[in-house]
Image: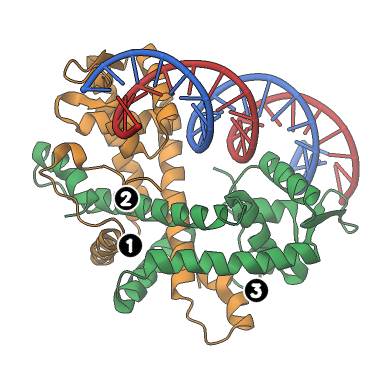
Chain colours: A green, B orange, C red, D blue
Amino acid sequence: MDRADVAVEIWRAEHPGLDMTMKKLGVRLRWVTHHLERELRRELAAHDVEMWEMEVVMALRRAPGYQLSAGAILRQCQVTSGAITNRVARLEQRGWVRRDVDLGDRRQVLVTLTPDGVARANQLVALKTEAEQRIFGGIDPETRERLSDDLRSLLLSIEGPIHPDEASGCFTYPPKD
Amino acid sequence: MDRADVAVEIWRAEHPGLDMTMKKLGVRLRWVTHHLERELRRELAAHDVEMWEMEVVMALRRAPGYQLSAGAILRQCQVTSGAITNRVARLEQRGWVRRDVDLGDRRQVLVTLTPDGVARANQLVALKTEAEQRIFGGIDPETRERLSDDLRSLLLSIEGPIHPDEASGCFTYPPKD
DNA sequence: GAAGATTGACGGCTCAATCTTG
DNA sequence: CAAGATTGAGCCGTCAATCTTC
């Protein structure tokens, strides 16, 4: 009997016979994700890092040359362009990233991790891994892999496959609304 | 090849042999949840409702007598007490809820759905169900149920079982931090 | 003193408007 | 005109301090 079972009990009483699988699935997804983020937030807070810093730094850490355009960052972080402008500005002030105009297309701004930024990013990888292990370590590996595979199917059904070739488009978000 | 496969490719290249299951699991969880919330947000926006309104109203809709203490709402919505005070105040202003002092324990405030609030809540149930079907409808029922079951195991391993008897404690959040 | 709710300062995000470049 | 980034206004959440009631 988990949180989702209890939550849908009221609906089952009102509308017996209805399939509650999707409702339960939604509740469980939200809560597990919530716990994961909470755990990560705690881990980071102990090292004076905040979630938004990690999101940007990790996106750059994965990029070739530790460099991404502002637009590419916003697609990975799932926030608006205004938010990215502010985030990058704050990171620049702390000396973790550098901002340059793209000479090929002067509308774009290229954000690059500084050596300090790379060092910081490498710390964060470890912290993130610890948080993940603390949250996901409680179930047996078999269940964990099945879960990951099924979530993969679901994610594919929502946003379709990602082609690794189109490096720049890897994380592009569906058109707009 | 989904978003998670692409994202961990850089780590696989740097540290071959490492188990990436947990990392992928984390990425997929966050993105699926993100899509679910985005879909729900769009659905609600079309009816001039915002997420925070729905969270509070739905929590009350499920409660016996459509009534919950401010603290109970806070535990279901996963926000701080200050946020709840504001949310309830705004809902009260729109006439969806009523606020009364608990006569049994005058420290507590009891929040109750008004008839207008109940009507509104019933609309929202339908909207939420539509969003869920749009997000979860793309995979076969078998996978969906397995996914729900495995997430149940994971959620139980994180927060333990919930006893339906302790009605008031159903959604209580672990001590503090 | 502890628990529950409220308040206000502050931070970060969204949104729309604007500017620049293609 | 379209695309990318920046700006400022407004909203909402967190956090810490405060007040009331147990």
Residue A83 placement (x, y as % from top left): 67, 41
- The residue at 13%/45% (across/down) is B164
- Is the C-beta separation of discs 2 and 3 under 8 Å? no
Left or right of B105: which side holds D10?
right
Q: What amino acid does circle 3 point to?
A: Asp
Residue B148, quarter of picture? bottom left
* Distance CA(mark 2)–CA(mark 1): 14 Å
**What residue is pinned by disc 2?**
A26
- The residue at 74%/43% (across/down) is A85
Residue B115: which numbered mark, if any? none
* Distance CA(mark 3)–CA(mark 1): 26 Å
Q: Mark 3 lies on which chain?
A: A
Residue B125, quarter of picture? top left
The reply to whether residue B46 is in sight is no
**What residue is pinned by disc 3?**
A165
Left or right of A153: which side holds A80?
right
* Distance CA(mark 2)–CA(mark 3): 32 Å
Q: What element carries label 2?
A: helix
- The residue at 31%/59% (across/down) is B158
Residue A148 placement (x, y as % from top left): 39, 70
Residue B71 placement (x, y as % from top left): 30, 30
In this rendering, which labeled residue sits more in front, label 2 or label 3?
2
